[in-house]
Amino acid sequence: MPNDGKSQAAPVPQETQGGLARLAYSFTEWAETWFPDAFVFVILTTIVVAIANLATGAGPVAIAKGFGDGFWTLIPFTMQMAMVAITGYVVASSPPCTRLINRLAAFPSTGPGAIAWVSFVSMASSYFNWALSLVLGGLLVRALARRVDLKMDYRAAGAAAYLGLGATWALGLSSSSAMLQANPASLPKSISDITGIIPLSQTIFLWQSVVMGLIILGMSVLIAYFSAPKGRHVRTAQDMGCDVTEDGVVADKPERPGEWFEFTPVLPILIVLLAIGFCWAEFSKKDALSVISNLNTYNFIFLMIGLLLHGNIRSFLKAVTKAVPTSAGVLIQFPFYGAIATMLTLVLGSDGVSISHHIANVFVSIASVHTFPVVIGIYSAILGFLIPSGGGKWIIEAPYVMQAAKDLHAHMGWAVQVYNAAEALPNLINPFWMLPLLGVLGLKARDIVGFCFTQLIFHTPMVLFLLWALALTL
């Protein structure tokens, strides 16, 4: 082409924003505008449950008493969850784990690839322990966000780190209901009289359960990759105003003789030796899975590992100080969830039936042996949004759900897995379990829930289909 003397501007490349990315971005824009803080959400839920109790004929005084009686019922669990966040952060911020996380952060070469990688690490680790997936995923996101060569959307990466809780955890070794059903010493008589003991080989180790977990994992990674924002839609950690500086604790030196005790490795080693003795006694008397599934033991082991990895008391205490803010949401919101659970399960109205049983009767009454997985799956997901506790909700739900499974001659182990797979669905958009992760990332629930909702609209039909289709093979 002849040159006419006029400069020609180079064409501006157009952004290749995929359909899933546009969908996730739309949901996120909506959530950033309309989605309330997690604490507002729990207050609204409390009010709705109180109104529902009024509809059953309960008096205001009875409702208020149920609210007050239930408020502190989750205090042990609240402390356990706070320690999950703290101990996980302490371990992950130790020098050896910081080096490991930085190595993991070196693998991805693109923003969407990094988000897909976070989702895989989060879900794979959640199979072994859901608490580990939250902290490991969160710190991996922070490490990736520090890479100046990687333009990664911090919100989408945060949502990917949450997929372990929202997709696969209940199908793995930390499944509260499966562990409860397999341990006769822990199983309440109200459930054992109906189900008996159901070994793990009939729940999480069924080949149908393993196949379902792999399908969900693969689907989630693909959605995370293709829904990742690109171009001008990307919001990095810096854009969000989040501090993602190195998580490891910087070592210092004693300045006076009295500080020697804080820096010597001798004291941590002596304490860890005591811990090893305790663990030896526990594992020699009990099944290994039952020991690990106990949150107290899990937190104890993680705390001792953190103390050992930091090598001295000063470094360990600095890590604890940095970790405590990650548990703030848990400490203030869990008591309200205890009140909600009590108001849902107590008989407060004049009809002699709790709200949870009202809901259950609607679904259980329309189930057949073929529709049972889908009907109970839908019910478990709905109730899980109001009572976001896998183990606690199972104790509430199991007596009538498992009786229905028994009456319909459904596979009892698969009924547990129906509960597990469906129970994880509401976690995707429920701020309850997001709190420890959000504390690590410095984000709000509204920042990641749009991307989580994108996962939910694909997960719901797929999980319900798998529950129905795989049940036909049993």
Image (spheres, rainbow, N blue to C red):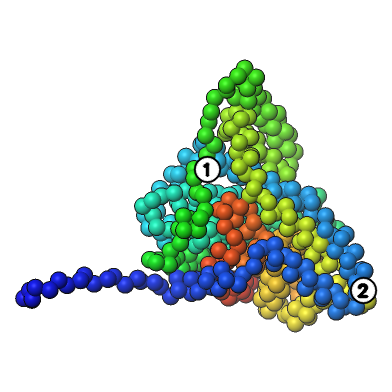
Dot 1 surroundings within 10 Å: few (below 14), some, or many (20 or more)?
Answer: some
Measuring from the top left, give residue 422's x and y in whole percent: 65, 68
Dot 2 surroundings within 10 Å: few (below 14), some, or many (20 or more)?
Answer: some
Give the answer, above or below, for where 303 lies relative to 237.
above
Give the residue at x 62% y 69%.
35
Q: Which residue is mark 2?
A: 59
Measuring from the top left, give residue 14's x and y in whole percent: 31, 72
Q: Quadrant of the N terminus?
A: bottom left
Measuring from the top left, give residue 152's x and y in whole percent: 43, 58
Which amino acid type is marked by label 2?
Answer: Gly
Q: Which mark is residue 289?
A: none
Q: Earlier in the sequence, mark 2 or mark 1?
A: 2
Give the residue at x 48% y 71%.
25
Q: Nearer the viewer, residue 174 or 358?
A: 358
Q: Quadrant of the C terminus?
A: bottom right
Which amino acid type is marked by label 1?
Answer: Asp
Going by the image, does 3 lie left or right of 62? left
Residue farthest to the front, as pictured:
5
Q: Which mark is residue 247?
A: 1
Residue farthest to the bottom, as pictured:
366
Give the answer, above or below, for where 444 lies relative to 243.
below
Going by the image, does 265 lie left or right of 108? right
Measuring from the top left, give residue 445's x and y in whole percent: 60, 62
Assign a secondary structure to mark 2. loop
Q: Nearer the viewer, residue 160 or 458?
A: 160
Give the answer, above or below, for where 419 lies relative to 293.
below
Going by the image, does 260 lie left or right of 79? left
**Residue 273 in view of the camera:** no
Give the residue at x 38% y 51%.
148
Give the residue at x 79% y 51%.
75
Assign a secondary structure to mark 1. loop
**Residue 147 in view of the camera:** yes
